[in-house]
Image: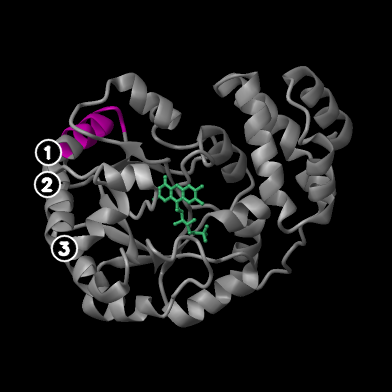
């Protein structure tokens, strides 16, 4: 069984992948989507999206990272996939799930779920454009407005020879509103032979085992859950080997934050680091009252110097 860290644009960048994969339990990462319109991105854009390309497409802790592309036109997607592979990408993931208005207006992400043919053409064209040993994978939602086409979409992805399919078990219209409809996965599995990765609303070890019970998938992907509890993957792995599951302690979690801040400073700049650290503290606050206290204390600080000083004082 493999556990995937979900791609999250504006959240799970190089620094977050590095921070989380260091803690263990994550078997596979996917970059934030790289939007493709009609042109071939320069190499610098790929390196920005996936700095791991320079380290054999693995995080410093050895976890493989696939490059995710998003777009509505097969040819430019194929050209960009070729470049990613030339730069060392271990696999290409195609995004058919993004609900953002700007993305869908420009004909990418979840809007493509309205047409099985277009999904097929994109996966097929990208698949044929890169060497057969490099996986091409797809990530979908159950549909755009409703899940009526989801079995056909999954079949189209399989016919195009994708290596696996990740299913975020909601439609575009559902947005991120709970629940996730895991019960669609057994139907998709019945119609297809490729590997399915189940995704959506796994927030804790209990949710994970319920998802296993319903979907019987080999692999699982988690996004927001690990942002609120960075040790979630490790805990799930412990539960699978019947080890005692170690609890998450704020005293331990808080130590991650100054390191995360400094790494984000180096990755982009000080102001970026302030905003990303606040963003992560907000996500941690969802499940942790102590994190909320820290968030409330430093959310008003805008200047990097005072933010850093306070973060160091509170979290070291
Ligand atoms: C802020 C944010 C950004 C996201 N960006 C991406 C993305 O770049 N590519 C993608 O395939 N999915 C993206 N997603 C969807 C997640 O990968 C995942 O499918 C979704 O959050 C459901 O999983 P979860 O309940 O474990 O969070 C994003 C989700 C969020 C909340």
Asked whether residue 95 appears in the rendered view, the answer is no
The location of residue 277, given as percent across then percent down, is: 68, 35
Badge 2, how many Cα within 10 Å: few under 14, some, many 20+?
A: some
Q: Residue at x 19, y 33 (%)?
A: 82
Label 2 close to label 3 by CB (< 8 Å)? no
Label disc, if present, on residue 305 of the rendered structure: none
Q: Is residue 284 left or right of residue 81?
A: right
Label 3 crowding class (10 Å Cα cut-off): few <14, some 14-19, many 20+? Answer: some
Residue 208 image position (x, y, % from top left): 56, 71
Q: Which residue is mark 2?
A: 125
Front disc: 2 or 1: 1
Q: Is residue 314 magenta?
A: no
- The image shows residue 66, relative to residue 150, as above or below, that is above
What label does residue 75 carry, if any?
Answer: 1
Q: Which residue is mark 3?
A: 116
Q: Secondary structure at mark 3?
A: helix
* Earlier-in-chain disc, 2 versus 3: 3
Question: Marks 3/1: CA distance?
Answer: 17 Å
């Amino acid at each position: 069984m493999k556990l995937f860290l979900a791609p999250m644009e504006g959240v799970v960048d190089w620094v977050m992948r590095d921070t989380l994969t260091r803690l263990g339990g994550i078997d596979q990462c996917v970059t934030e989507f790289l939007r493709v319109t009609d042109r071939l991105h320069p190499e610098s854009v790929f390196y920005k999206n996936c700095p791991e390309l320079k380290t054999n497409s693995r995080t410093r802790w050895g976890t493989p990272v696939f490059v995710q592309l998003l777009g509505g036109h097969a040819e430019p997607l194929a050209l960009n996939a070729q470049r990613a592979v030339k730069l060392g990408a271990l696999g290409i993931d195609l995004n058919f799930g993004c609900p953002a208005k700007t993305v869908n207006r420009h004909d990418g992400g979840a809007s493509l779920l309205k047409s099985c043919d277009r999904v097929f053409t994109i996966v097929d064209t990208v698949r044929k454009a890169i060497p057969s040993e490099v996986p091409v994978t797809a990530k979908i939602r159950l549909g755009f407005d409703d899940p009526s086409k989801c079995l056909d979409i999954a079949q189209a992805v399989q016919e195009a020879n994708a290596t696996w399919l990740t299913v975020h078990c909601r439609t575009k219209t559902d947005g991120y509103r709970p629940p996730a409809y895991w019960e669609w996965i057994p139907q998709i599995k019945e119609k297809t032979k490729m590997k399915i990765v189940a995704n959506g609303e796994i927030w804790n070890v209990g949710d994970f085992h319920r998802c296993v019970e319903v979907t019987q998938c080999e692999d699982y992907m988690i996004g927001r859950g690990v942002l609120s509890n960075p040790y979630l993957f490790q805990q799930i792995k412990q539960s699978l080997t019947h080890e005692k599951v170690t609890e998450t302690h704020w005293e331990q979690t808080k130590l991650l934050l100054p390191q995360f801040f400094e790494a984000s400073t180096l990755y982009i700049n000080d102001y970026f680091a302030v905003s990303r650290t606040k963003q992560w503290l907000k996500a941690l606050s969802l499940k942790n009252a102590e994190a909320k206290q820290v968030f409330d204390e430093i959310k008003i600080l805008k200047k990097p110097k005072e933010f850093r000083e306070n973060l160091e004082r509170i979290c070291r």
